[in-house]
Each structure stands twice: as C-alpha cells, then as structure tokens.
Image (spheres, grey):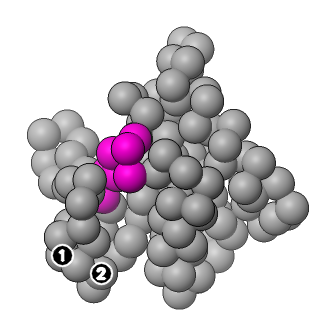
Amino acid sequence: MPLSEEVEELADRIRRHLSDRPEITERTMFGGVAFMLNGNMLVGPIKGGGLLVRVGKEAYDEMLALPGVSPMTFTGREMKGYVEVDADAIETGDRLASWIAQAEQFVQTLPPK
C-alpha cells in the first residue's frame, strides 16, 4: 500500500535532513516508514503529517508537556517512550531537526541491533 502524500512528504524532509548519515536506515513499520539509528527506531512520519518520535521513558512526561505533543498509541495502548508530534510543531526545518535530535539523544544510549 503506498504512503499518503503527507506521509511521503514528511519522509522526504526527514531523508534530506539525514542524507549524510550512513548509520541511518529506513524500514517499513506500522504500515509506513521508520527511520532507524543503528537498528533502533528513531522517528517516523505518521498520518496527518505528524511525526512519531522515540524519546525514552525518562523524557516522556517532559515531552508530553510541550505544545503539539501527545502520547503515541498503538492498538489502543499508550506506548510510553514514544510521542506523536503534530504537523504544526514540525512545520519548519529547525523544528523537525530539533525533534530528530531529541530522538537521537535517547536512541544513542541503546545498544545497536
């Protein structure tokens, strides 16, 4: 199933931001695409133009307090350590880069897969 236009557009923005990073790969997940750092999920575009961001359990509550951020739910269950960031909160390249950096800060603490 092809990705929606909004998901593909955000995926392209993420690709451009991470294009010089050989340790970043893409993987099909949750019916979309996820960007992986050393085999661990980093970020992924989601329906509605938002971004799924892996922030870890320690930063989870702090990230939820930010504007445009909500819990990530999958099959009706909240996935602590992952947040959804609204499209408006990643509208500029700097905002998108900031969220990718936030995810990377956590994911770099994980062992490679």
**Quarter of the N terminus within the rendering:** top right
Where is residue 59, by image quadrant? bottom left
Residue drawn at 40 percent across, 41 percent down: 87
Q: In the image, 51: left or right of 68?
A: right
1 and 2 marks in contact (CB < 8 Å)? yes
Give the distance between the C-alpha atoms of the residues marked 1 and 2, in whole angstroms: 6 Å
Residue drawn at 54 percent across, 57 percent down: 96
| Residue 7 in picture, x, y percent from top left | 52, 29
| Three-letter code, disc 2 | Ala
Residue range corresponding to the magenta coloring:
83-89
Q: Is residue 110 shown to the viewer in this render?
A: no
Which element type, helix, strand or loop, lies under badge 2? helix
Residue that numbered label 2 is attached to = 59
| Residue 27 in picture, x, y percent from top left | 63, 43
Give neighbour class at mark 2: few <14, some 14-19, many 20+ (Cα, 10 Å): some
| Three-letter code, disc 1 | Asp
Q: Which mark is residue 61?
A: 1
Residue drawn at 37 percent across, 29 percent down: 48
